[in-house]
Image: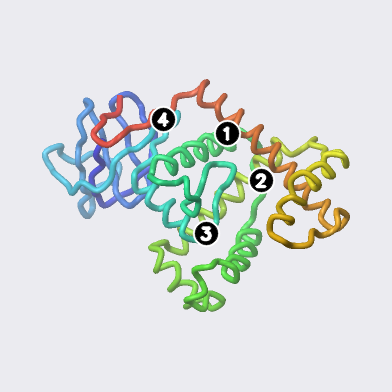
Amino acid sequence: MTVHLQSRIVRSSWRGCRWTLLALGFWIQQANCQTVIAPVSAGQPSYLPAPPSVKGTPLDRVVAIVNGTVILDSDVSQELRFDSLGLDDKQLGPSKATPELTDRSLVIERLINRELILQQIQLEPPMDIGTDAVDKQIAELRRSIPGCARYDCKTEAGWQAYLSSIHVTDKEFRAHWLQRLQVLAFTERRFSMGIRIPPEQVRTYYEQTLLPQYRLAGAKAPPLESISARIQQVLIEQQVSALLTDWLHSLRAQGSVIVLHPGEEAP
């Protein structure tokens, strides 16, 4: 499916053969299964469809439909730009930094998983993630993002220059990070509660996983007591990841996830 450049907003849900896309600075309407281009002229109400004879510039296409919500090819491109930060959503799929990511299809899978979680978040009581939490994390990121080595990201000018270099606006970055915090908070609340790691499991991980790695690297391993808390957190994360994976498979089975390859039309 091809999406055409317009002057309003894009993003939306699929409803048969009639839909409106909302979020990227242009809008589209589909009627009778044919794409209708509709630039908005000055003084024209944004909700009125323009004549179907007007043509626009092809810009985007739908790559997936998740329970009625579309994921665009431009969403995939933006996700790849965020990957350049070197920060990945390990639970939702590999990042660009990992060798197994050889094409955009794996990023699409990650976006599908994230959309499934976001849809479930809407069904839960609101999570209180304020601007202070976002500000604090972004401040830490500005000191630690590898790409910031070329910029003085501690200054506002340097940070804006860095964001410009990866073609991401400050607003987009903040929205992305807030969404990330929401997903992490949701998965922790849903899956981490009640998980208990017994001391013998921590010791087994230390002896059978960590010690061989240190020996292979020719380094001295820290005592178990000094890293037991970190090992426990790693084991909790592994269990959460397994539970999340099973849950996402269940959501896909119960819902509707359609992946569209280039040249394919949406049903």
Q: Amino acid at mark 2?
A: Ala
Residue depth check, mark 3 versus mark 2: number of the one nearer the observer: 3
Marks 3 and 2, Cα distance to the nearest angstrom?
Answer: 21 Å
| Amino acid tagged 3 | Gly
State the quadrant of the C terminus.
top left
Residue 97 in percent (x, y) is at 49, 54
Q: Residue furthest top?
A: 254
Measured in 3D between alpha carbons, the distance from the residue under mark 4 to the one under mark 2, in whole angstroms, is: 25 Å
What mark, if any, has residue 120 been given in the picture?
1
Q: Is 8 on the left or on the right of 179, as rendered?
A: left
Does label 1 or label 2 sit earlier along the sequence? 1
Q: Residue drawn at (60%, 33%), measured in percent from left and top?
A: 245
Residue 14: give x, y in percent of width and height.
36, 30
Percent x, y for residue 63? 34, 37
Label annotation for residue 68:
4
Q: Quadrant of the N terminus?
A: top left
First-in-chain label (3 vs 4): 4
Q: Please name the residue that numbered disc 3 is placed on.
A: 86
Q: From the viewer's perspective, is 144 left or right of 267?
A: right
The answer to whether 149 appears left or right of 72 in the picture is: right
Which is in the foreground here, disc 1 or disc 3? Answer: 3
Q: CA distance from mark 1 to mark 4?
A: 14 Å
Kindly identify the amino acid type of the residue bearing the numbered disc 4. Answer: Gly
- Is there a contact, CB below 8 Å, between mark 1 and mark 4? no
Determine crowd level at label 4: few under 14, some 14-19, many 20+ residues with C-alpha closer than 10 A.
some
The residue under the point 40% across, 53% down is 78
Q: Is the residue 197 above or below the residue 167 in the image?
A: above
The residue beneath circle 2 is 185
Which mark sits nearer the N-terminus, 1 or 4? 4
SS of the residue under disc 2: helix
Whether tag 1 and tag 2 are in contact, CB under 8 A, the answer is no
